[in-house]
Image (tube, rainbow, N blue to C red):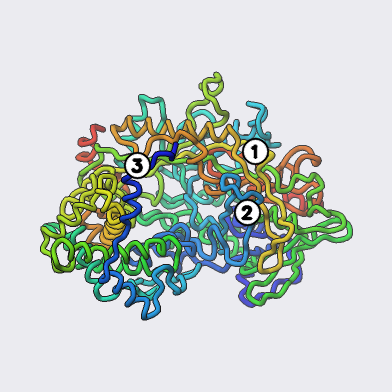
Amino acid sequence: MSTSILPPRMDRRTAIKWMLTAAAAAAVLERDAVGADPAMPAAKGYGTDPDLLKDYKPGAAWPLTFNETERATAAALCDVIIPADAKSPSAASLGVHDFIDEWISAPYAEQAADRKPILEGLAWLNTESQRRFQNDFVSLIASQQNALCSDLAYAPIAKPEFMTAAQFFKKFRDLTAGGFYTTPVGMKDLGYIGNVPRASFAGPTSEVLKKLGLV
Amino acid sequence: MPFLTNRKTQPSYDVIVVGSGAAGGQTAYTLTMAGAKVLMVEAGRNYDPVKETPMFQTDGQAPLRGAGTPDKDLGFYDSTVDGGWKVPGEPFTNASSDPKRQFTWWRARMLGGRTNHWGRISLRNGPYDFKGHSRDGLGLDWPITYDDVAPYYDKVEMLVGIYGNNDGLENTPNSSPGVLLPPPAMRAGELLAQKKSQPLGIPVISAHRAVLSVKQDADNIPAKLHPGNHRAQRILAEAMRARAACFWATDCGRGCSIKANYQSPTVHLPPALATDNLDILTDAMVREVTLDENGKATGITYIDRVTGEERHVSARVVVLAASSCETVRILLNSKSPRFPQGVANSSGVVGKYIMDTVATSLGGQIPALENLPLANEDGAGGIHTYVPWWLYSEQHAGKLDFPRGYHIEFGTGRRMPGLGTAAGLEWLTGGSFGRSFKEDARRYYGSFISFGGRGDMIPNEDCFCELDPTVKDKWGIPVLRFHWKWSDYELRQTAHQQKTFAAMIEAMGGKVRTPPAADPSTVIRPGGNVKHEVGGARMGDDPKTSVTNAFGQTWDVKNLFLTDAAPFCSNADKNPTLTIMALAWRASDYLLEELRKGNL
C-alpha cells in the first residue's frame, strides 16, 4: 500500500497519544521515587517447577505495584465493566483489581508489555474525569463513569483522541472478565457446572437436543 | 530394582533404555515383563502424577489466572515441568534467522516426558500411511506394512486403554473386536457439527483417545498380552485394577492422579517396576553411546545432573528412546574413529527427514449454541469427536492441488471458564461493558467452536538437524541446529484446511472469527509447534540410505536400537504416539528374540 498520502488525522492521532497532566505524571513519579520500574518488574518468575497444588493469591508469586490511587481507580473501573446485578456481585468485590495488579507486576514479557499502558491508562482516566467532571474517576456518579467509558468501549469506532484510551480499555475489560469468570462466583454466573467427579457422561439432555433440532 | 535415589547403578544391565516417555515406557515395559534387567535413564526429575497432579484447581487459584508464561508455556496447570519451548541452559539453534525457516523444539525434562501432558489422541496409521511413496511418488516408504504393525496396535490399545469406535472408513483402520473401550457420548456442539457437516460430505465420528471410559478388563486382557507368562499376567492385572475409570472432569493435559488416562509414569512404569527387573535413574543427561573395539555398543555416558559428575554404565544392548531429535543428538554426539559422523551414521542420514504435523486452525461463533440449558460438558478431558481424512477418492482423481490428507480436531462446549472465555467479544458485542457485558458473556459462553487441522507432511531435503559447530549446553554437550522449510504441498494443504473450517462453521449457521487466510504461510503453525516431530533416523531396507532396519535396530551397531519416532519414514495425519508405542513393542519383541538367540 502507498504511504505517500498521510491523512491529516494520522498526524493528529500520533500527536494526541497520552496527554499526561501534572497529576498523572505525579502518580508515575511517586512510584519512581520508591524504585519500581514502570517498564519491567525486577521480581523473579515462579520458575519451571512451581508447586501446582498451592493456592496463589495476587502478591504471592511476586510483589504488587498499584499505589492507593491506582488500586482505587482500577477497582472502580472493574466495577464499571462488571457491576453487580441480580445474578452476581461486582468484579472488584471479588478482588479482580488485585489480579490486574498481579498481571502488570509479573516479570514476564507478555504481561510487562501491559504494565505501562495500564498504569498510564489509569492515570489518564483520572485526568479525563477531572477535565470533564472535575472529579477523580472513583468519585464520579455512575452515569458520568459510563459516559466516559462509552467513548472508549470499542476501539474501531472510537474518536481519534480516544484511540489509545480505547486500547487500554479493551485490555482492561479482557483482564477484568478473565479475572472475574475464573472465580467460583464468575463460573457460576456463566452457568458452568462442571469440575466435579461424575459416574458417567451421558451427553446432551433431550431438552438440549430438541433446541438444536437434533431429535 | 527401584528408583535409584542413591544414584548407584548396577555393574551391568541387559538393556539400557534412554528416555521414559511413550517409547521408553513401552520398551521398558515389554523388556522387563519378559525378564530382561533394564536400566531406564531419564534426563529430567522424578515425577509422580498421583501426588502432583492439580486435578480440581481452577485458574482463579493460579498466578495470572493460569496464563502461559515462559516458565510454563502451555499454562500454569499444564503438567510439563522443567521443560517447554526453552529449557534453561540447554539451548538449540536454527541456521536461518527467518522465522518461517525455523524449527521450534518442545522438550519435557521429567519422568514420563511428554506423555504427561499430551492430548491422548490415539489414531492408527492406515495401510496407505506406510507406503506413501508407492502411492503418489512422494516422500519415503516404510520397510513395513500396516499388517506388520496391526497386532501391536491391538496390544498397545488393550494395555493403555483407548476409547473409540470401529467406523470402517478408508485408511482409518478398525481395531480387533473387543479391543477398544466405548467412546463417550458426543457433546451438543459436536452433534451439531456432525449433522451440519453431513451435507458437505465431511464425516464427524468418535475420536480415539487413551482414556479409560470404563475400567479395563483386568481378568482377561493380561492373558492376551502375555500368553504363558503368569507372573507378567499377575503384575499387569494388579496394575490395571489400580487404575480408575474417568470421572468426567478435569483436563487430561494436567495429568491424571486417578490413572484414568495414559501417561507413562502411571501405566507403563508401575508394572515394569513391579517385575523387579527395572532400575530408574532420573536427572541423568546422556551424552553418548560408548563402543568397544569391535564396534559394539557397551553402554552410555551420562552427566549426573545432581552431582555434575560424568558417569558410565554398561549393558548388553542400548535403546535410545529419548524423543526423535534428542535421539539424533545422542547419535551425532557419539563420535569415534569408527564413526566420525556419529554412531550408526555410515549412511549420513542421521538428522535428515525430520517432519512435524501440518496444522492451522479457524474459529467461529455459532448462534444455535447460545443460551442453551445448563449442562456439564467436561466429558473426558479432551476431544470426543474428530473428522478423519475423507477425500481419498477426490485426491486420487486429481481434484485436489495437494497430496496427502489431514484430520480435523475440534473444540466446543461449556468448558471450564478461563482467562480468555469472555475476552475479545467486541466483534460480537460492539464493545459492551457494564450489565449488558455480563448478559453478553452469559449469552456467548459455550457458543464458540474451533477447528484445527492435523495433516501429513512430506519429508524434504530442507528439513533436518545437525550438531551446531560451536554452541554447547551447560553440560558441555554440543546442541542441535535446525533447518526447516515447508514445501508447497504443506502450504496448499493449509489453504484447504482453512477453507474447509470456514465452510463447516458456516454450515452450522455460524460466523468465522477471521476469514480464511489468503496466504497460508501466515497461518501454518511453525515447524515443531505441534510437537509431533518425527524422523531423523529413518528405517529402511537399505543400509546405505537408512539408519535402522524394520525393527529400529541400527544397521551399523547391531546392539543399538531406536524405539522412538526417529525411525519414522512418514508423518501421517494421525498423531504419532500410538504408533510410537506399537513400534516400540514390536522392536522390543525382536530385541528379546535376538538376545535369546545370542545374536546381540
Image quarter where the C terminus of chain A lies is top left
- Give the residue pinned by disc 1: B459
| Real-space CA distance between mark 3 and mark 1, rounded to the nearest whole angstrom | 49 Å
How many residues crowd mark 2 within 10 Å: few (<14), some (14–19), many (20+)? Answer: many
How many residues crowd mark 1 within 10 Å: few (<14), some (14–19), many (20+)? Answer: many
Front residue of this view, candidates B581 and B290: B290
Verify CB contact (< 8 Å) between mark 1 and mark 2.
no
Report the amino acid beneath label 1.
Answer: Pro
Horizontal side, residue A120 vs residue B293: left or right: left
- Give the residue pinned by disc 3: A7
Task: Residue B519: give x, y in percent of width and height.
Answer: 49, 35
Q: Quadrant of residue B342?
A: bottom right
**Residue farthest along the right direction in this orientation:** B293
Can I make out residue A56 in this image?
yes
- Output the chain of dot 3: A
Image quarter where the N terminus of chain A lies is top left
Is A146 drawn above or below residue B142 in the view shown? below
Q: Nearer the viewer, mark 1 or mark 2?
A: 1
- Give the residue pinned by disc 2: B323
Horizontal side, residue B221 vs residue B207: left or right: right
Verify CB contact (< 8 Å) between mark 3 and mark 2.
no
Q: Say whether mark 2 and mark 1 are on the same chain.
A: yes
Front residue of this view, candidates B291 and A68: A68
Report the amino acid beneath label 2.
Answer: Ser
Task: Residue B302: give x, y in percent of width and height.
Answer: 71, 67
Verify CB contact (< 8 Å) between mark 3 and mark 1.
no
Report the amino acid beneath label 3.
Answer: Pro
Q: Secondary structure at mark 2?
A: loop
